[in-house]
Structures are given as C-alpha cells and as structure tokens.
Image (cartoon, rainbow, N blue to C red):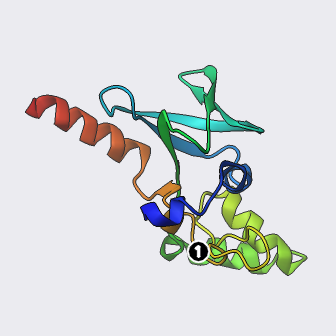
Amino acid sequence: MFSIMNKITIAEQLMIFSRYLGQQVVIRSLLNDDSEVIGTLKGIRQNALLVDIDEVNRWIPLNDNFSICEVKLLLKPLKKLTTSIINTANSLPVQAFITPYYQQLGFDMPVFISPGHSCNCKYVYELDLADYRTASEILSSQRQAVMVR
C-alpha cells in the first residue's frame, strides 16, 4: 500500500477525508510510542484535519514531504450493508444521493480523484486511508498491549 500512498497528494487525501466529515478517525503518532487515539473528523483546511479528541478540537497537520502521524477513517466495508439501509438508499429521490448517503453512514466507497487518476475506483481502505476496526476494537487491543508489556 505504500506505493499507492506515494501517488496521493495531501490535497487529494483531504478531498477524500472531506467526504467523511463527522466520522471517527484513528490517529497514530509516528513520533512517539505508536499509540492510537480516536477522534471525530470535524473539518478540513488546506493542510490539516480538524479532529475532536475528547471534546477538544485539534488541527492535525498533513504535509507531502513528511508525516508526524497517520490518520485513518474508521469505516465499514460495504458487505456490512443491511437490507434496511439498501432499501432506504434505493428509495432516495435521485440515484446520485446513494453514495453520499452510504458515506454519511460510514461505509467505505470507491473514490474519484480526477479523470485518469490511477487511484480512481479504489476503496478508501485500499488507499490506506481507512481502517475497518471499530473504535472499541482499537481501544481493546491497546488495553491488551498494555497488559502484555
């Protein structure tokens, strides 16, 4: 997946993240102990993500030349769609509303970056910008890691 990330600029990553405002993210520090923190994506600006962590808004800087942390959306694979969600999506007045509806519910959807981009039609997870674990699974694995140490 590392080679794919080299093809996605920070601007393109921000465009993908912007479709998932309100979703949970996991942030892993690349500077300290690799600890993971859960937050909620609240906003985007030219070079940063605004994330609510424990009711404190923090700007997470992103840069094409270096990384201080890794940010991934906590999304669900499409195989977890329920009949009820599919029926609701199919009842929307315009077919173009289906993808934003699924994104709003936190489902991983294929991305469109720009015409001819090599990462078009890939899922966010395939671009290494999403994690299919839940927040509780991440927190549970952290507790287990602490117990092992």
Q: Would you identify the image quadrant in which residue 42 lies? A: top right
Q: Is 20 located above or below residue 111 in the figure?
A: above
Would you say 6 lies left or right of 149 here?
A: right
What residue is rendered at 37% in x and 42% in y? 136
In the displayed structure, 92 sits above or below 63; it is below
Q: Say which residue label 1 marks.
A: 122
Q: Is residue 75 left or right of residue 142?
A: right
Viewer-side residue, 142 vs 126: 126
Where is residue 127? Give x, y as percent: 53, 64
Point 65% across, 58% down: residue: 105
Taking 99 as reference, is 38 left or right?
left
Quarter of the C terminus within the rendering: top left
| Outermost residue to the right | 93
Q: Secondary structure at mark 1?
A: loop
Q: Amino acid at mark 1?
A: Lys
- Rendered residue at 62%/39% (across/down): 63
Residue 76 visible at all = no
**Residue 37, image x, y percentages:** 43, 32
Q: Position of residue 148 (x, y in %)?
A: 9, 34
